[in-house]
Every structure is written in C-alpha cells, then in structure tokens.
Amino acid sequence: MKFRDFMLLAILCTTTFFIYNTALPADIMEVRNFITAREIIDNDSWLYPTLNGVLQLEKPPLPTWVAAIIEYVSPDSLGAQRMAAGVMAVVWITFFYYVALYLSQRKDYALYSTIIFMTCYNVVQMGRTASWDIYCNAFMMAAIYFLMRGLYDDYFKERQRPWLYLPLAGLMMGLSFLSKGPVAFYAQLLPALIAALIFIRPLDVREKWKPLAAMVVICLVVSGWWYVYLLLNHHEEVMAFLSQHAYWGTRIVRPWYYYWRFFCETGAWTTLMLTALMVPFWNKRLPERRGYLIAVTWTLVALVLLSLIPEKRVRYLLPMMTPCSLAMGYVIIYFKDYCHKDRQAERLFLLNGVVMSVVTFTLPVLVFIFGYQRDSMHLDSYVGITLLIVLAGLWIARATMNRDAGQLIFGVAALFAVICSFLLRPIANVFDNPDKNSIHQISNLDLPFYHKADEDLRIELIYSARHQIKPLDLSDEKAVEKAMPCVVITRDDITKSLSGEQLKKIRLEPLGRFDDNKHPKGNEHYTADFINHATILRQR
C-alpha cells in the first residue's frame, strides 16, 4: 500500500469512527453491554457475567470483557467504550483491504472497495456503537482472509504456508464465536465459502488435512471453553436460562422479503449497489469477471440465508456490506478503465454521479431546516459547514463530468469526513431532551434499589442508576419490610401502591420524579416508560 493511500484510509477511519463518538446517546444494546461490564468489575465475576444480577448468556463474553477492562480503567466513559468498537472497525477494514487485494491483485481496486465499505451507512453506525456485532464480523473477516491464503495460495507462485494461515483462521473463527456465537459463521463465512468454492476450487486439499484439522480444533477450543466452564460449574443456571430462551430467534418475526431493501444499508452508495446488481450487463463486460461473480454470489447467498431466519433486524445486514462493497468496487474499476470507451457504462456512471451530486447539494438545505432553524448550531457554523459540503459536491460533480471514477470515490469520502467531523454533534442536539432529569442523580445512594414488580423496567434505568434494580412486590408486607431501607422505583406516586397499614409502618422520603427520555417531548420515541418516581423506604 502506498503511503498516500495509507494516510487517506487512516484519516477517513479517524473521522468516521472516532471523532465525536459520544455525540449520540448509548442505545439499548450498548447499555446491556455496559451494565454487564460494570457488574463484572463490581463483583469480580469475569467467568460468570450477569445482567442485573442474572446470568447473561444471550451474548458471548469477549466484547463484554473488553468493555469491563475499559470500565475498570476509565469508569463511565462512553467515548472510551466506543473507541474500542472503532478499533475493531479498523481491524475489519484492514482485513477487508487485504481480501480485496488478494481477490483482484489490484491496489486501486482494494483502495476504492475499502473506501466504499468504510462509508457504508451500516458499517459507520456499528463502528460507532459499542456492541457485539462489530467484534464478531471483524474477527470473521480476518478468518476469511487467512482461510483464503491457506486454501488458495497454491495459485500464486511459492507462497503456500497452510500451517501459518489455517491455524490463524481457526483462532479468528474462535474469537468471532466468542464475540457473538455462530452469527458471523452463518451470515459471513458460509456465504463466502459457497461463493468461493463455486468459482475457485482449492488445490491439494487432501495434502492440507492436518492444518485444516488444526484449524477446526483451535476454533472449537477457543469457541467452547467458556461454555464448558459454565456447564461444569453453573449447570443449573445454564439449563434454566436455556429453558427460558428456547424460542430465541422468533421474538421479532418478519416476512421473508423483509430484507428486499438491503442495498439501502449502503447509504450513499445505494444507486451504485443497484448498478452492481445488473449481473447480465457486467458479466459480459468485466475483465475480472470471476471476482465480481464471487462478490455478487456472496451477496445473494447471504441475503437468502438471512431471509430464512424468522427474526429479522436491519443491523443483521451488517455482514452483507462486505460482499456488497467488493461488488461495487469491480464496477468502479470498470468505470475507471473503460468509461470513455463504453457508452452504456458511461451512462450508468453519469447516473450515479448526478444522483450523488444532487444529494450532496441538497444537504445544506436539510441542515438549515433541521439544524440551524432548530437552534442546534450557530450561523457561522452553518455557513462553514455549508461551504465544506458545497466544496465536496463540486468535487463529486467535477469527477462526474470528467468521467473520473476514482475522484468520485474520493469526493464521497471527503463528504463523509465533513459530515462526521462537523455535523454529528448538531444532529445529536436536535434529538436531545432539554427536559431530561436523569435518575443518575441518585446513583450515589448506598442503598439497594428495587422497582415495582408488576411494572416493566427499562434496562437503561439500571445503567443510569448504577445499581442492580430487582423487582419487589409492594403488596407483600414481609418482603417490603425485609428490603428496607431501600430505594423503590415506581411509575406513579408510591403511596398509590402501598396499603394504609403499610404507610403507618413506613417512612417515605421522596427523591423526585425523573425523566430519562433521550428524545424531546413530541418525538415518536418519547415514552412514559422513562418517567419514574424514586422514593426511599425506611421503617418508622
């Protein structure tokens, strides 16, 4: 890689994943991770992670261990937690680059594909979020690279080192499983293997059975040792958890066609992704036809496999951004090399360039309406941001007129750098709740916390309160008496939940009414679930 290309990717990684990484509040997946990490530190329970005191088996522990280390070094630092996710995004991007380079043997293709990949909406979003997804997919990307080198290096001179690459692939697979179970195996590795084996069959597989066996053994050991420990030492809790979660995967059931708009998850590259899906058109034109067909087949197989699972969420499409970006990279390379010679390809390039230019020049209007008019930025900030966006738009427009696909990619990269560097904080201010009165204010109380047993408790409140909050049946006088002194969280005034006899025996110390909504009133996400009363209960 040229030093110029390295610096470009480094700057883009910095702006995309690290600058203003605390602009948006922690989402529910992050909160679950942080609570478990905090309880690991508080209880010194590294091998027995809990969420609100209950064994946490829904997600494997590796990302939470990382979060716990960060929590120990820098308590309550959302920026530090998200920085770790950003580092894993960089790991994913690094191995993506080398996979692209290995497939094409072209540095320009690897560079363009990597820029496309790291600016896909889903990748940007998850790379700025301290959850499990970025870990498992980053490790699996490394596993795919090492697996390719171990299986296919026979085709490239004397570079074959299966005893190096295949055990490394097993290690990365194991770390991926320890990050989020079989998710990346199913959504990223399996489609990649199917696509690769259709178009490139490895040589001398029988001679590699020993390193392949070592890969499998390493993968099984790294993947399974923690589960074996739990089964041996906490068998009853594990069985109870499994019986309660027997129907995992059917909680949010969507129709099979739910992912039909998967190309929209590429964000700015939506039009280009649709262009890349014109398989009959490109199959006749692309010199690197095999690599393109591998990428498209990988994409479609992943789409089918994900569609077969009843539970569907948009973030589950994250691993599909890898083959999508590889496919778009081949189209960009063709535009770069043959746009002036192929009239139909030229029209497609102009269509993509015009759409990107129009969208870019529309952004200042949207920033004015949703940013400046809502007082989330000052006039000088708006003018400066508008100027930078217009310059990026001119860059994209000029690249379009000159039929320069490479400069088009760089122009979009510059636009992303501007958005991440200057727009994220004003955007966050628009959705902030000015009336927020967080329960975090009482987190320093050295008392046990409870919530009314027949009321659901948002997991975010446990994070804000910095306490485990267990259910308490307020109608059970003995249970209440045993719990006191304590803090009780209720939706309404607690006097409505206690009997007259109880009120005679209990001294109430109201702490206030708290609103932990992250969004302002009037927003569709504003909910009464985050509005609660807190009261200290003591015996008279």
Image: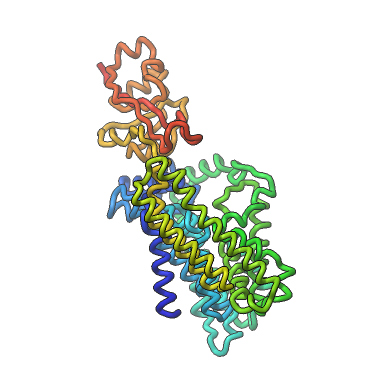
Q: Is residue 284 left or right of residue 457?
A: right
Q: Relative to 152, say whether 224 is above or below.
A: above
Which residue sits at x=33%, y=36%? 465
Which residue sits at x=29%, y=49%? 75
Q: Relative to 480, say whether 131 is above or below.
A: below
* Residue 318 position within the rendered picture, expressed as x and y whole percent measured from the top left: 55, 57
* Residue 187 position within the rendered picture, expressed as x and y whole percent measured from the top left: 60, 59
Q: Is residue 342 left or right of residue 367?
A: right
Which residue sits at x=51%, y=56%? 361
Whether residue 55 is visible? yes
Q: Is residue 351 left or right of residue 367?
A: right
Which residue sits at x=47%, y=25%? 454
Q: How is the image coloured?
A: rainbow
Q: Relative to 345, say whether 2 is above or below.
A: below
Toward which corner of the image does residue 511 lie, by quadrant? top left
Most foreground residue, 496 or 299: 299
* Residue 347 position within the rendered picture, expressed as x and y whole percent measured from the top left: 67, 68
Most foreground residue, 420 or 145: 420
Most foreground residue, 196 or 13: 13
Q: Quadrant for the C terminus, please.
A: top left
Toward which corner of the image does residue 290 lie, by quadrant? bottom right
Q: Relative to 213, say whether 417 is above or below.
A: above
Most foreground residue, 479 or 114: 114
Label tally? 0
Toward which corner of the image does residue 277 lie, by quadrant? bottom right
Q: Quadrant for the N terminus, please.
A: bottom left
* Residue 229 position within the rendered picture, expressed as x and y whole percent measured from the top left: 45, 54
